[in-house]
Image (cartoon, rainbow, N blue to C red):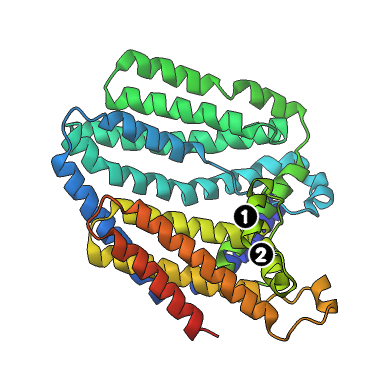
Amino acid sequence: MNSLQDVWRTRFTHYMGEVQKYMRFVFTGHLAIVIMFVLGAGGYQYSEWLKTTSSDFPAIWLAAAIMGIVLGFSRPVTLIRKPDEVYLLPLETKLPQYFAKALRYTFGSQVIAVILFYLVIWPMLRQVAGLEPITIIIGLIASILLKWWNINSEFTYRWAYKGHNVWMDRIVRMIGSFALLLSILNVQFIPIIIMILIIVCYPMSWKKKVKETPFPYEHFVRLEENRMMGIYRFANYFTDVPNIHGSIKRRAWLDWMYKVIPYAKKNTQEYLVFRSFVRTDDHFYLWLRLTVISALAAAFVHIPIAIAVVVAALSFATTIQLKQALTSSNDFRMDMLYPLPKGARKKAAVKIVRYTIIVQAIIVLFAGLGTPYFFAQGFVVFIIGELTIRLSK
């Protein structure tokens, strides 16, 4: 038992050191300003919406649905590594003690998000739904307990079935969490009792199978590797993380986009850079994620200064990161063997980045069509992107 405690303590210390090492580059002063503006604008819009929303709005249903989704995503953090497949075999009977610590940490790290989301929907439940504070507090306590149940249920399911079709288990748990919270907030005692019985009985068969199934090291090692890679890729948007390589996907449904680049020798690098952008997950999803956030902000935030700061910051982040990613590739490519002009790749990368910013500006413009200053939003995105292209190295 002591050796496993030492193993967890050592790994947890190393894990926290890795996270802190990279997160200090992520949460800088610039990002803090953006977050402050986003939270301030979002809070203002939310408070204004609460004042104008009628009592007929299904606030309880919406709150239960949001919490059900938040509760359903409960991936366990085990810090299991590949050598454990060999070195932990002699201690396999003591693994439950190790996983008890892992699940406690998972709960402690994820319950914070549950509480924050619930505090956000609290005013809606109080002002729109007209619930009593005691009912809302009971709903919060139930959400915390449901988080513990979701984490343990997902861990047990992954052990029993090696993670196969875990999305089905997740959907079932989301529905169960939603139904129980809905019953609690509506103060329906019989449905509450029924849902508690269902929730308690749901993972019972898996617990029996866990006793008969060896621990699936391969699945949990892959789960940890994917989780850590997600952290590294997120940090890589803000600083260089060693040994990070974006995965490549075919994306055949976007083949028609390559026709945008005219077929000519002078466009060789432009075509190759564009294919790299479309097929590389890190590049493509970076642009997609920041564009979607900008569009949502343009559509739902109606404070001119706040929206200008947000879309400008996201336009700058998109441009600077894509430009650096597409121009700083040191991998060997077949085009290096051909006598192309010096600096052709950098010029092509700048051109492709400009295309992405233009598309982002158009999307933001259309997303804000319901506001009187929608044209200015798209203009800000394009101007900030163009200035970043010209002024950055």
Q: Amino acid at mark 2?
A: Pro
Q: Mark 1 or mark 2: which is in front?
A: 2
Percent coordinates x, y for residue 284 in the rendering: 59, 59
Quadrant containing the C terminus in the rendered view: bottom right
Q: Residues within 10 Å of mark 2 (few under 14, many from 20)?
A: few
Q: Residue at x 41, y 28 (%)?
A: 178
Question: The disc labelled 1 sits on which kind of residue?
Answer: Met
Q: Evaluate if marks 1 and 2 touch, with contact meaning CB atoms under 8 Å apart.
A: no
In the drawing, what numbered circle is on residue 262? 2
Q: How many marks?
A: 2
Which of 273 and 208 lies nearest the eye of the viewer?
A: 273
Which residue of the protein is positioned furthest toward the top in this rendering?
Answer: 190
| Residue positioned 47% across, 65% down in the render | 358
Q: Nearer the viewer, residue 53 or 369?
A: 369
1 or 2: tag closer to the N-terminus: 1
**Residue 183, picture quadrant:** top left
**Relative image position of residue 113 (x, y in whole percent):** 41, 49
Is residue 167 in view? yes
Which residue occupies 53% across, 26% down? 172
Q: Residue at x 46, y 25 (%)?
A: 176
Secondary structure under tag 1 reads helix
Q: Considering the numbered disc 2 on the image, is that residue within a helix, a strand or a loop? A: loop
Say left or right for 238 vs 258.
Answer: left
Distance, label 1 to label 2, CA atoms, is: 11 Å
Is residue 35 visible in the rendered structure shown here?
A: no
- The residue tagged 1 is 257
